[in-house]
Image: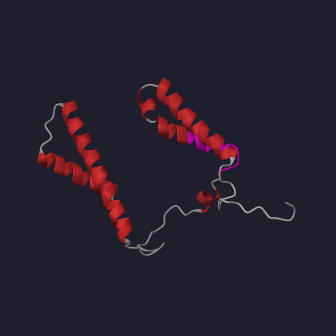
């Protein structure tokens, strides 16, 4: 009706913009084609190459620029709590605990599979070291 303003239902007015969807499709297509037709190292880094191809396309379309990168200092000191103080929310803590349990189960399976593939026995001590290292990396 005349005189009524259209209120967007999504906070970001560019949400679902076809240009962004097109760049996303280019990235996905690039990854799939590189993984299918490339060999060796290039096939292994297909996701990275797809992201780079998408970045070049977004820059060419004017969707991405490097102004802030050009203005940034070469070295800077990041201080603890400079951005914000930590929040200890019980729901978030429980969620991350569950995520870490899933990561530990997945890592255990990976360690056992790698041990079987390489013919090396994965004992309790090796599994403990692997999970500690994986946990440190996740931290």
Q: Is residue 48 above or below residue 41?
A: below
The structure residue drawn at horizontal position 52% and vertical position 61%, both measured from the top left corner, is 74
Q: Nearer the viewer, residue 46 or 3?
A: 3
**Is 59 inside the magenta-drawn segment?**
yes
Residue 72 in the image: state x and y as whole percent. Answer: 57, 62
The structure residue drawn at horizontal position 25% and vertical position 52%, both measured from the top left corner, is 133
Does residue 56 appear to the left or right of 90 in the view shown?
Answer: right
Residue 45 in the image: state x and y as whole percent. Answer: 45, 36
**Is 33 inside the magenta-drawn segment?**
no
Does residue 88 appear to the left or right of 135 in the view shown?
Answer: right
The structure residue drawn at horizontal position 35% and vertical position 61%, both measured from the top left corner, is 96
Does residue 22 appear to the left or right of 74 in the view shown?
Answer: right
Residue 56 in the image: state x and y as whole percent. Answer: 62, 42
Q: Splitting the image into 4 quarters, where does residue 111 fall?
A: top left
Q: Is residue 53 above or below residue 77?
A: above
Does residue 17 appear to the left or right of 39 in the view shown?
Answer: right
Residue 125 in the image: state x and y as whole percent. Answer: 12, 49
Quadrant of the image for the C terminus? bottom left
Q: Nearer the viewer, residue 16 or 114?
A: 16
Q: Nearer the viewer, residue 89 or 68?
A: 89
Q: Is residue 49 above or below residue 62?
A: above
Residue at the extreme front of the image, as rendered: 1
The structure residue drawn at horizontal position 56% and vertical position 33%, both measured from the top left corner, is 30
What range is drawn magenta here? 52-64
């Amino acid at each position: 009706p005349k005189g009524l303003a259209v209120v967007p239902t999504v906070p970001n007015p560019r949400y679902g913009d076809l240009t962004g969807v097109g760049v996303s499709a280019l990235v996905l297509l690039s990854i799939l084609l590189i993984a299918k037709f490339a060999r060796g190292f290039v096939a292994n880094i297909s996701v990275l190459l797809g992201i780079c191809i998408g970045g070049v396309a977004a820059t060419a379309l004017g969707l991405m620029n490097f102004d802030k990168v050009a203005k940034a200092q070469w070295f800077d000191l990041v201080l603890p709590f400079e951005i914000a103080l930590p929040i200890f929310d019980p729901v978030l803590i429980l969620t991350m605990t569950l995520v870490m349990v899933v990561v530990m189960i997945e890592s255990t399976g990976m360690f056992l599979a790698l041990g079987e593939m390489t013919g090396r026995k994965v004992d309790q001590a090796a599994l403990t070291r692997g999970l500690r290292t994986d946990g440190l990396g996740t931290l």
